[in-house]
Amino acid sequence: MDWLEDELRRALARQDAPVGFAERVLARGRREPHGARRWLAAAAMVVVAAGAAGAWRQHQGYEAKREMMLALRLAAAPMHRIQLEVKDITQ
Amino acid sequence: MKTLLIACLAALPVLAAPQQFQLNLDSVAAKSSQHVDVSLNSATLQFAAKFLDADNPDESRVRKLIEGIEGIYVRHYNFKSAGVWTQADLEPIRAQLHGPEWSKIVGSTNAEDGGSTEVWLHLAGNKSIGMAIVATDPKEVTVVNIAGNIDLETLAKLGGHFGVPKVKDPKKEHKED
């Protein structure tokens, strides 16, 4: 069992942390909440921008529909008049 | 080379859609008291069609009607009094319609109200690929150009669905009596 004890002793031997490790850990801990907040803000901005783009597209769509209906109404009116006159003649 | 490219690009709209004519009605517009100017190309029509309500029978009819349409171009003018516009103002339009590819299918004049309506089709072989309507009365001028294939009967039927009184069939009316 000596070899096992030797292995364990080697593996679990105390080692000093690299230079500046503690500072790096503390600095990261301090940074993390701001980073998370930044990502959250960016995500919120993307959601708002996507929503605004969707609303704008919908507005444009309804505007295009309104113009299309107006154009068809103006085209249909003379056709309707002719239909009326033809019916008058054939009556 | 650059000049040639610009010239080719400038000529492109004319070459792309022969059934589409120039709605050069500046003289009429200048005399009008109110005017409506609508130009919708194929992409805009397809986009607009996405906003039609499938459950609404009228809008379903419109969706079907615009399936074959590549563009709708409308100019509508109102005048404060009769005699402001003259037939000469419409000559630039009529000159384009006198080409061999355009056939006048209906021309009607109403002596009572002084109104007239002309319907022209742009034919390619036996197929209609464009349409023009020139409708006038003393205080109104409407010029419509539809590029593509359009069902005239469906268009006429829409007259009763967009605030224009529906044509009453005298036979049906008689039966109801």
Image: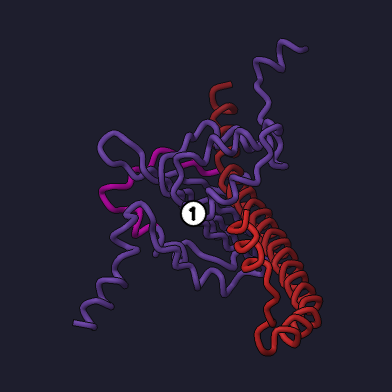
Amino acid identity at mark 1: Ala
* Callout 1: chain: B
Q: Is residue B41 above or below residue B162?
A: below
Q: Residue at x 79, y 83 (%)?
A: A26
**Can you tell which chain is drawn red?**
A
Q: Residue at x 70, y 67 (%)?
A: A46
Q: Is residue A88 left or right of residue B146?
A: right
Return the x and y of residue B156 as percentages of the image width and height: 57, 35
**Can you tell which chain is drawn purple?**
B
Q: Residue at x 73, y 63 (%)?
A: A47
Work out whether residue A84 or residue B86 is closer to the camera in this orientation and state it. A84
Work out whether residue A58 or residue A48 is closer to the camera in this orientation and state it. A48
Res B38 visible: yes
Q: Which residue is mark 1?
A: B43
Q: Is residue B138 left or right of residue B124?
A: right
- In the picture as drawn, the residue positioned furthest to the front comes out as A2
Return the x and y of residue B169 as percentages of the image width and height: 65, 22
The quadrant of the rendering that contains the C terminus of chain B is top right
Q: How many marks do you count on the picture?
A: 1
Work out whether residue A68 or residue B98 is closer to the camera in this orientation and state it. A68
Return the x and y of residue B107 as percentages of the image width and height: 45, 42
Q: Residue at x 30, y 65 (%)?
A: B12
Q: Point out the stretch of residues depicted in magenta.
A: B94-111
Crowd around label 1: few <14 · some 14–19 · many ≥20 (10 Å) = few
